[in-house]
Amino acid sequence: NKYYKPKDWSAGCNLKDRGCGSIIRYNWFEGGVRLLDLVDPEDGAPSFLQDPLWGKIYVYGNILVNPLGGGAASMIHFGFDGLWQNAQVKLYFYHNTVINMNDQTDGGRWYTYIFKCDNDNQTVWAANNIFHSYCPNPDHWSGEFYLMAGGGRLNLGLNWVPSWTLMGDVYKLKGAQNLM
């Protein structure tokens, strides 16, 4: 599937999922206030929280493009909109290509975060991904590029990142040596 940029000024997320054991695979996501918004089930919490698959989301084989001109400061929101007790817990993020385009020099974002967690109980497992940030104008800067915001746990397998990538706000980090 291809999920293109939502309408200008809509303040919409590209994909918002409140599911249980969701699998998001083999898609193209481009644009949105957030490319992926993976959050609590709101009024579905009483039944969802009892399901053994609750709190686990699998994202693999996708291409995520944060476009030039706007774009998301936090590309993937993983957590909750309502009650922290109902937050998603584990995000398994494998074999994805994440591309951030920005021209900070020409008035674009100062920074971009790939993952935004909402508390220290959430864990992102990321392996075999390509995380790339660039400015189409080679004489300009694409802004600071962070892996994490919000203080969650980040467990890294092998991933390719630009050499200037920053960790960001991480509560616990494992596998920083696996970044290439």
Image (spheres, rainbow, N blue to C red):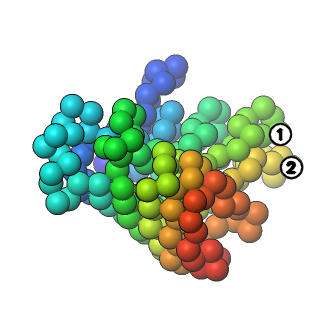
Q: Position of residue 55 (x, y in %)?
A: 29, 54
Element assignment for label 1: helix
At x 81% / y 35%, what residue is drawn? Answer: 106
Q: Dot 2: within a 10 Å radius of its alpha carbon, few (fewer than 14), some, or many (20 or more) residues?
A: few
112 horizontally vs 110: left or right: left
Residue ranking furthest to the right? 139
Which disc, if any, is residue 139?
2
Residue at image point 18% right, 36% down:
44
| Disc 1 target residue | 105
What amino acid does circle 2 point to?
Asp
Any part of residue 65 in sight? no
Q: For the residue carrying disc 1, how many other residues have a C-alpha within 10 Å: few (<14), some (14-19), or many (20+)?
A: some
Q: Quadrant of residue 13?
A: top left
Q: Earlier in the sequence, mark 1 or mark 2?
A: 1
**Residue at the extreme top:** 9
Can you give x and y, in whole percent of width and height, for residue 120 in the image?
49, 55
The kind of residue tagged 1 is: Thr
Q: Which label sits on residue 163?
A: none
Q: Are the two marked residues, 1 and 2, in contact with CB atoms closer than 8 angstroms?
A: yes
Question: Which residue corresponds to the image point at 61% horizontal and 40% vertical from the top-left?
Answer: 73
The one nearer the camera, 167 or 110, is 167
* 52 to 82, vertically: above or below: below
**SS for tag 2?**
loop
Q: Residue furthest front?
A: 85
* Observer-nearest of 132 and 169: 169
Lateral position of residue 62 relative to residue 73, left or right: left
Q: Residue at x 62, y 32 (%)?
A: 70
